[in-house]
Image: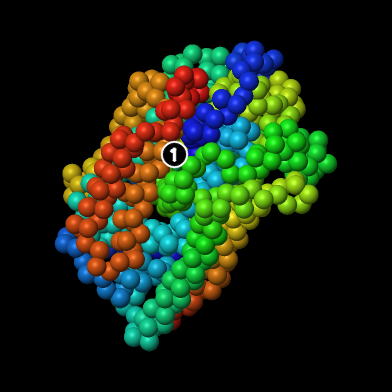
Amino acid sequence: MTTSPPASVAQSLAAPKPITPASQLAMGSTAATEIADSMSHPELAELAALAARRGRLAALLTTIMMIGYFGFIGLVAFAKPTAGTLLAGGRVSVGIVAGACVIVLAPILTSIYVRWANRHYDVAVRRLRGGKA
Amino acid sequence: MNALTLLTAVGAEATKEAVKTAKAATSLGQPNVTAIAFFFLFVSITLGITYWAARRTRSTREYFAAGGSLGSVQNGFALAGDYMSAASFLGIAGLVSMSGFDGLIYSVGWLVGWPVITFLIAEPLRNLGKFTFADVLAFRLRQRPVRIAAASGTLTVVTFYLIAQMVGAGGLIHLMFGLSYKVAVVIVGGVMLLYVLFGGMIATTWVQIIKAVLLLMGATLLAGLVLSRFGWNPLELFAAARDRYGSAVLAPGKLVASPLEAISLGIALMFGTAGLPHVLMRFYTVPDAATARRSVALATTIIGAFYLVTFILGFGASVLVGRETINSVAAGGNMAAPLLAEALGGTGFLGFISAVAFATILAVVAGLTLSGSAALSHDLWNHVVCKGQSPEHEQLRIAKIATVILALLAIGLGILFKDENVAFMVGLAFAIAASANFPALLLSMAWKKFTTRGAVASMVTGTVSAVVLILLSPPSGSTSCTTPPPSCR
């Protein structure tokens, strides 16, 4: 793992740098720039595809979270009577159920992402890095 | 997050509704032997840990990031401990007890920032940074301008958040222990300074872990006591609240007057979380990205569960203690949870919950101070003043000087701003975090053509517009506190 600051942090004392494929990868992957720099083309392409897949999953999950959350906020903002509609024999309201669902949704989505990233993404990055050596 | 945040509009409405009765029969405000015993136990254990941690804190990486040595469970609890302030606990429980449903809006909003952090900024933060989020901006933008802007944003957020916590601490401790306001502020600032100055991130982390465990235990136990009276069915509890206060208690109330307000509040809560420097800093305290991700997932779960529990506590207090009684002790309902503890578990349990609230504030101010110290030492001193050439021991010395300055500042401003509305300053801190820190951070990762000038402009505009707009607007917080109760200051 790349716990040490990438070389780039030290370098960046100088002028702004353009985004290279390597720096893009570092932004979305555990592979540090210097690793990507020393990779062959097919590996680099595979790593880029992997980073893109991570980006798509992150975007999808963010969208789901936003829809859930702003759906709840929208319910409170634009449909107060609906939010106040009673359910279950008048013992709970639509708004409370919706809010509780959003609270439960957040850790579920986070866990899905973390599971994928730790089990597939990191493993694939590590395999590509191993291939380099 | 701030307890006292929640004393705002809804608190005011509730105050009007509530009948002002004579001070309820409670031992709150008198020195409580159990509370003092628990508090001393907590402080001695944590200072013992600080002594142990001090010997492991020799480099800046150890001071700011615990040497990157924490496990995912440790860091997950510490993240939750950083985030769950006395406010989430006392404030949301109080808001729910006074107005029912509306408290849920804050709970939901304060949770949904976490998945966003995980999906969008965790990886780059982890890969490109060392101690602060400015490291990420400086990765491909010009160092000095972006670091100055990012450090200013961080310090502004930290300062307002610190003042809010200190002012809240003074008020709460005054209420709970009967100590004078100034003494309470000095104690919190002094103990916090010992943790951060000598123990750095390692001591701060353990303070946060212990606090998170105590807070979860206390809140869960209390919620269990509540639910045991309602056949372990939350629906029966809601029904009892509805029978007593009408079905409005289960519906959106007066917290958000217009749709625009609701959406604006929603955005600030969500993205404010993602721009809080002391939360972002915790990505650097673990050895690798996988551990960082696991710890955020754990923190999200803990915080989500905690907010559900708090919702139960609020309803429990409104039914089992009653709004009139809660309001007679402190307007706005901040004392709902301690009163509930007293009603269900006696003075001993009240003492435990009070001590936990004190510990909670200590842990949060420690995390805030450390992140402010990192901005001053790492961003401003090392990278801006010394152009990255400052030797290690000098950076550490500057960090410790910065910690002392921030602690004195927090104590001084806490006393100076005694009568300021806490909600106002927490609102400011969240608004700045959401409009200054988060957009620049996100765009520097997502937008290839983002330039240094654009980053600085976005951070300056965010900070200035948030501060100016809040100063110019009629703050709902201040109108609700025309006659500030102790906890409202």
Residue B156 coordinates in the image, percent (x, y): 31, 38
Q: Nearer the viewer, residue B348 or B304?
A: B304
Residue at the left extreme, as displayed: A15
Can residue B438 be seen here? The reply is yes
Q: Secondary structure at mark 1?
A: helix
Residue B360 coordinates in the image, percent (x, y): 54, 33
Question: Mark 1 is on which residue type?
Answer: Gly
Residue at the bottom extreme, as displayed: A42
Q: Is residue B8 left or right of residue B417?
A: right
State the quadrant of the C terminus of chain A. Answer: bottom left
| Vertical order, B431 against B292 (above or below) | above
Q: Nearer the viewer, residue B169 or A118?
A: B169
- The residue at the point 42 percent across, 76 percent down is A52
Q: Which residue is mark 1?
A: B367
State the quadrant of the N terminus of chain A. Answer: bottom left
Residue at the right extreme, as displayed: B231
Q: Nearer the viewer, residue B267 or B217?
A: B267
Residue B489 coordinates in the image, percent (x, y): 45, 23
